[in-house]
């Protein structure tokens, strides 16, 4: 049985940071080689903005 992990799990946070770092390194290499940018960006959010935070009250907020 697989264990359910939340956003606060250290391995989830570590994996997110690893992917974000790899993305930034790839984007830098792409620009250096071809002067091109990816049409994406890594968004940094504060913990207060998480609509699925288990500690928050009520339904997720949509904007």
Image (spheres, rainbow, N blue to C red):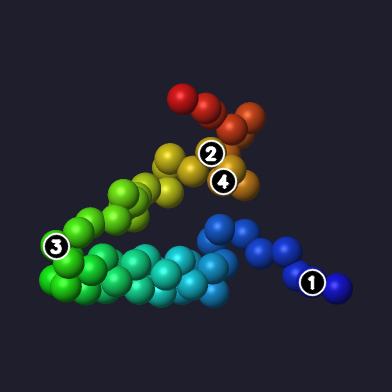
Residue at disc 3, secondary structure: loop
Count of all numbered marks drawn on residues in the image: 4
The residue positioned 42% from the left and 49% from the top of the image is: 47
Verify CB contact (< 8 Å) between mark 4 and mark 3.
Answer: no
| Residue 13 locus on image (x, y percent) | 48, 67
Left or right: where 12 falls relative to 34: right
Name which of mark 4 and mark 3 comes first in the sequence. Answer: 3
Question: Could you tell me how far apart the alpha carbons at marks 3 and 1 are, in whole angstroms?
Answer: 43 Å
- Which residue is tagged 3? 35
Residue 6 visible from this viewpoint: yes
The front one of 42 and 10 is: 42
| Residue 61 locus on image (x, y percent) | 53, 29
Question: Could you tell me how far apart the alpha carbons at marks 4 and 3 are, in whole angstroms?
Answer: 39 Å
In terms of image quadrants, where is residue 4?
A: bottom right
Name which of mark 4 and mark 1 comes first in the sequence. Answer: 1
The residue positioned 56% from the left and 46% from the top of the image is: 53
Q: Quadrant of the N terminus?
A: bottom right
Circle 4 or circle 1, nearest the eye: 1
- Which residue is tagged 1? 2
Question: Could you tell me how far apart the alpha carbons at marks 3 and 2 are, in whole angstroms?
Answer: 36 Å
Question: Could you tell me how far apart the alpha carbons at marks 4 and 2 are, in whole angstroms?
Answer: 6 Å
- Which residue is tagged 4? 53
Question: Could you tell me how far apart the alpha carbons at marks 1 and 2 are, in whole angstroms?
Answer: 24 Å
The residue positioned 23% from the left and 56% from the top of the image is: 37
Residue at disc 1, secondary structure: loop
Which mark is on residue 51? 2
Residue at disc 2, secondary structure: loop
Left or right: where 34 falls relative to 26: left
Name which of mark 3 and mark 1 comes first in the sequence. Answer: 1
Residue at disc 4, secondary structure: loop
């Amino acid at each position: 049985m697989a264990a359910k992990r939340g956003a606060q799990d250290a391995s989830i946070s570590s994996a997110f940071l690893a992917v974000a770092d790899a993305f930034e390194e790839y984007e830098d290499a792409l620009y250096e080689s071809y002067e091109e940018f990816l049409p994406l960006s890594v968004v940094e959010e504060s913990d207060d903005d998480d609509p699925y935070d288990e500690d928050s009250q009520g339904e997720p907020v949509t904007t």
